[in-house]
Image (spheres, helix red, strand yellow):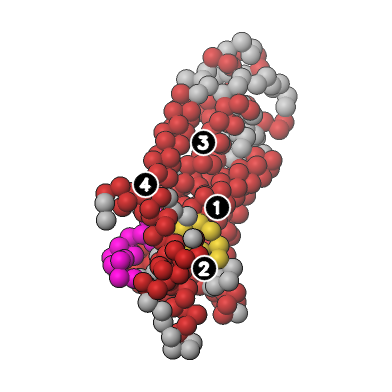
Amino acid sequence: MTLWTTFLQFQGVRWVFTICVALMSFLIGQFGTPYCKAFHWDDESINMPFAAQEIFPNWSLVLIVAVPIGVQGLVIFFLPRKNFMFPATANTTPRRQLLLELNSWALIQIQALMLQLMFVDTMKLYAGRLRPDFLDRLRSVGLTAETGLQYHCELMSNSVVRQGRLSFPSGHSSTSFAAMVPFTIFLMHYFRPWLHGCIIRLVLSLLPLYLAFFVAVSRTRDNRHHFADILAGSIIGVFAAFGAFLINLKYSGSVGNFDPRMYGPASMEEGILHVHNQEQQQHQNIGVIPSFGATSQSMRAAEA
């Protein structure tokens, strides 16, 4: 197997795309200037107290992102491989099968996060919506109604004030849903509650969504966001998650599997491997397992 084929099989093109999106998000978030929206000192919607301690501080987002990827690795490593998207064949060693499975789910998680991050960072700057605690942020740097408004647009270098203009949409909400929706899909793929009819499997699969809702609602308790902010952020996170899912996987309703969408030679090879795996499953009940060569020949005949 050539290096290029390996690059394609491990979805290198999508990794490069995801890295580019991450770089763009970083540049937008660090160097962009929020829209300087006018305000009134008697506006009670932005006059809530500034909470020094948040329920979910920024560093907690690292755990929200990292824990699903870690749990996915443990599930893939320890559970039986009968539900793997990449079937074990003569051309795919167990080690390579494991790495391909880990790579696919990690890519979906990270790609969803980067997609929502770029969109959210752009919208935050464009909207420039004031946080519920914006006036308290101004008072913290010595500005009051008596000092006038002539300097409020010149305080973008102050991180506390600058962050006060980045209310819409909620980044915590979008990040939590972008991380937990793919994780939920992953758990449902492996636990398969629809096949086993087990309520425990269903509850375990849906638990990550509970955490995402909890994180989103906490932003109103901390006076960091208006309700519309967390609603918009949550929707963006869900759409980014399903977008990453549809880009990288496809659902096979006949057998209840998720199949990877591949590129070039890797796409043809994995298509043959998956058809071979399906035929094995279908023929196991009658004791007939077709050979890999026969499967390849049947596909080539169908293509002709």
Residue 101: quadrant of the picture: bottom left
Q: Earlier in the sequence, mark 2 or mark 3?
A: 3
Q: Quadrant location of the N terminus?
A: bottom left
Instruction: Report the mark closest to the observer, 3 or 1.
Output: 1
Residue 246 — which label? 1
Amino acid type for the residue under numbered disc 4:
Gly
Q: Earlier in the sequence, mark 1 or mark 2?
A: 1
Where disc 4 sits, the SS reads helix
Instruction: Decide: is 212 above or below 188.
Output: above
Q: Earlier in the sequence, mark 3 or mark 1?
A: 3
Where disc 3 sits, the SS reads helix
Query: In the rendering, at what x and y percent does residue 284 appear?
Result: 45, 84
Residue 12 — which label? 4
Instruction: Decide: is 214 above or below 175.
Output: below
Residue at (42, 71) in percent of width and height:
295
- Residue extending furthest toward the top: 150
Q: Give the residue number, with chain letter if any, for mark 2.
A: 257
Residue 118 — which label? 3
